[in-house]
Image (tube, rainbow, N blue to C red):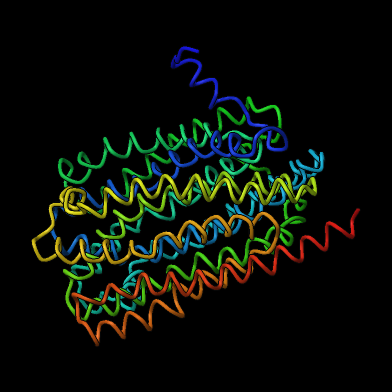
Amino acid sequence: MSFSFESFKRYFSKPTDLGEGSVGTTLLQMSIPAISMMLMNTLFFMVDTIFISWLGEKPTAAVSMTFPINIALFAFLEGAGGGTTALVGQNLGRGALEIAKKVAFSGLALGYVLSFLTLPMALPGVSASIFAQLGAGENKEILDMSYAYNFWLPLTAPLIAYTFISNSIFRCQGDTVTPMISMAIANLINGFLDPLFIFVFGWGVGGAAAATFVGRAFSVFYVHHKMKRNPGVSLPFLLPPRPTFMSYWRPIATIGLPVTLAVGSIALGFGGVNRVLSSFGMHAIAAWILGIRIEDFYFTIAMGVGSALTPFLAFNYGRRDLRRMVDGVKAASWIAGSLMTLVGAVIFVSPQAFLGLFHPSERVMDLAARSIRVSMLAYPIVVMQFTLGSFFIATGYSIFATATQLTRSVLARIPLAYFFAWWLGEGGIWWFQPISFLVGGLVTWLGYVYALSKIKKDFAQSR
């Protein structure tokens, strides 16, 4: 059979039947576009950081200070999106289309409400007090640049909320291509406008955030256009206020709140690590954020496979098909593990080739390369954590995802960062990463064993 681009396009663009066919083929068909989407989502921050790093170490450190705030926003949206995805997927698996539609509308309304929590960041006083606690101290230059970057967040947050929830709904219906294209549009525009706003207009770090806003706006236009043509669950951008939207907030929050706490713990972890690294100087914080940006590309594989696996598991959980769910977990692990091994080997051998995009100083380059190589020693654990994290969310056992993330990001990461900073200094502090992954991996596995045994009993009783 000859290959053609059109046949390739048709293969990935048609909605996938989540309940029939080969599990491995189904997940691969969903995972490739999902990984691409996650990669493009990561590119937002990567491209911003590349251009901002050309301004110097202080602007790079200032953007690093904003990282916990941005993670906090995504934590809330991950919670709303995770709860919505699980409930919509389960109801579609049961054939309850009308309930699935109501849950989707309720999830979007909740996403909009949560996005309004970013409004205080537009106030200079609030911004300065927050970033001072995150490691900027009384450094006015860093505080001003952090404010300039996050000033655009309240305007961008509702756009992120719409695309976030809508893309989750598309994935629940077996469509992972539309979310990928929406992120491609946003990234192309952001990448084009970044140098224009930052250097030509002279807006500095604030120009990067403005470019992101414009890119997200065009992404919303595309997603809204596709939603209007969607025959299943469809979401408008503007929701008329209805009291019924709140009726599903509680079940969404039951699943989503642990997800929010899990992702939010990442923000706490980054804030804590920034405080430790600030004792070495801004070059250490800059190295940390550059290392994270490179590692994000590695993580996108597991995140993409996980985002495809969640609706697959939720759908089959609604159908009470445990065998297909377990096979899905295994297949997703093989897909993510194989791809991550290939990509990880390239990054491990030559992290400097990727770090060179940021034009770092020799000292920052050395520390960032050490951070990447040491962290990657425990990255096989990442496959398990993201795969089983999807299992927890899809089945409503998201509390275990919270326990894993909280253990890894806060309870293990921050004390270990202090310990290795004291013991090995700035050259060896990075060992806190792989050890915290290992500790979190143990919690993940114990949670999976418990949740799987409970689900087996529940399915047996419902027969």
Which residue is drawn at the image coordinates 47% and 51% (left, top)? 302
Count up the numbered dots. Answer: 0
Which residue is drawn at the image coordinates 32% and 79% (left, top)? 417
- Residue that sits furthest to the top in the current view: 2
Work out whether 294 lies above or below 132. above
Q: Name the side, left or right, on which 196 lies relative to 437.
A: left
Residue 168 location, quadrant: top right
Is 425 or 193 nearer to us in this picture? Answer: 425
Residue 253 location, quadrant: bottom right
- Residue that sits furthest to the left in the current view: 362
Report x, y in % for residue 129: 34, 76
Is 152 or 274 nearer to us in this picture? Answer: 274
Report x, y in % for residue 399: 64, 69
Work out whether 52 lies above or below 414. above
Is 419 or 381 nearer to us in this picture? Answer: 381
Report x, y in % for residue 163: 52, 42
Which residue is drawn at the image coordinates 10% and 66% (left, top)? 363
Is 112 or 301 nearer to us in this picture? Answer: 301
Which residue is drawn at the image coordinates 36% and 73% (left, top)? 271
